[in-house]
Image: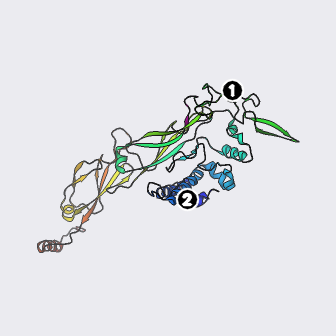
Amino acid sequence: MNKNPYEVLGVARDASDTDIKKAYHKLVMKYHPDKNPGDKAAEEKFKEVNNAFDILKDPQKRAAYDRYGDAAFAGGNGASAGMGGNPFGNGAFHFDMGGGAGMEDILREAMRGFGFGGFEGGARGAGARTRGRDLLDEVEISLRDAYFGKTHTVKFSSNVKCEKCNGFGTADGKPAPTCSRCGGTGFVNVQRGFFAMQTPCPECNGLGHKIDKKCPDCDGAGVVHKNRTIEVKIPAGIEDGARLRLAGQGEAGINGGAAGDFYLDVRVRDDARFARDGANLIMHVDLPFTTLALGGEIEVETIDDKKLSVKVPSGTQVGEKLRVRGHGMPTGRASSFGDLYIEIGIVIPTKLTDKQKKILEEFRDTKSTKKGWF
């Protein structure tokens, strides 16, 4: 039996999509196998978190669970169920982002639970081409990587279209003939006393077509399971929480249908030197009192390793920000960057010579008619 997804993620039943996503990101990073090598308990918890998120992120699945509980996924239609299971092993991948599964799939699984094993594919008009499922992964990058952009390599396994039969499952690589008994609908009408009902066609097993001679490579499935590698280009200036889409790089479709899409959620780690505010960067610099009072120049290093000489005006106050234009993050527009802000702090000396103390005492005792001079 599946565990309560709300309890697994630690959220209330009325939690918003944002709260669910935040809880998921926190837990998936905590229990990720890369951070817990060899820890079986963490591995199981990681799988539970992914399964729970698969249900709650999908409005239809969530509604079905809220109404029927575990019964909504009877017959094996759990959050991670599917052809070949989870192809990403211990990775943070998930299925069903709206690419093909919905209430029809839940109903199909319910029918299967009552013994209608051939109902797969029939809920959508049987022999119709069905779009493949979407795939989702997550990557965490540094702020420096977000500044320059990078290419992220994803390795996984999934169902892909069988090249020999063009995804149709037939030996000649052409669409299978329409079933003569059901006319391609996948259903036949059955009279039970006063009641008339539709059941999956026993001739074509609910598919709407019959494959007389199956493709030898995929045994009529139209898809084969393969290891895959995808190169995802993360653009310069990307923000934390952004989602990238690679069209047609998801799971293969059924009956020659289009493939789903591949999505990559990007998380940007906090940086030790810079805080980010949109396209702007903020760095903190502590300066001596004399520099703040008299003014001067300081040298700072930007995120792209450039050395900048920045003028500090006399009378600069603690907490004030000095603006350096064009040295923030890329904005996504050609040659356009945000700004760098230098937040000013102060360094208080802990040991003074007698001469330094005397100078400061003389300064303290200096009077001025200007209000608020010090």
Q: Residues within 10 Å of mark 2 (few under 14, many from 20)?
A: many
Res. 224 mark: none
At label 1, counting other C-alpha atoms closer than 10 Å, the crowd grade (few under 14, some 14-19, many 20 or more) is: some
Q: Secondary structure at mark 1?
A: loop
Q: Is residue 28 above or below residue 182?
A: below
On the image, the x and y values in percent for residue 302 come to: 27, 50
For the residues carrying marks 2 and 1, which lies nearer the camera in this image?
1
Instruction: Please name the amino acid that badge 2 sits on.
Output: Leu
Which quarter of the image is occupied by the N terminus?
bottom right
- Residue 9 is labelled as 2
Residue at (66%, 50%) from the top-left corner? 73
Tell me the chief SS of the magenta region. Answer: loop
Task: Tell me residue 251's x, y (percent).
Answer: 55, 39
**Quarter in which the C terminus is drawn:** bottom left
Q: Is residue 252 visible?
A: no
198 sits to left or right of 320: right
Tell me the magenta residue range.
160-164
Q: Nearer the viewer, residue 354 or 59?
A: 59
First of labels 2, 1 by sequence position: 2
Answer whether residue 86 is magenta in the image: no
Q: Residue at x 73, y 45 (%)?
A: 111
Tell me the residue that label 1 is attached to. Answer: 177
Which amino acid type is marked by label 1?
Pro
Tell whether label 1 touches label 2 (CB within 8 Å). no
Residue lying furthest front in this view? 216
In percent of width and height, residue 259 lies at 55, 36
Q: Is residue 144 visible?
A: yes
The mark tally for this picture is 2
Above/below status of 350 relative to 149: below
**Image coordinates for residue 234, horizontal then vertical, percent:** 41, 42
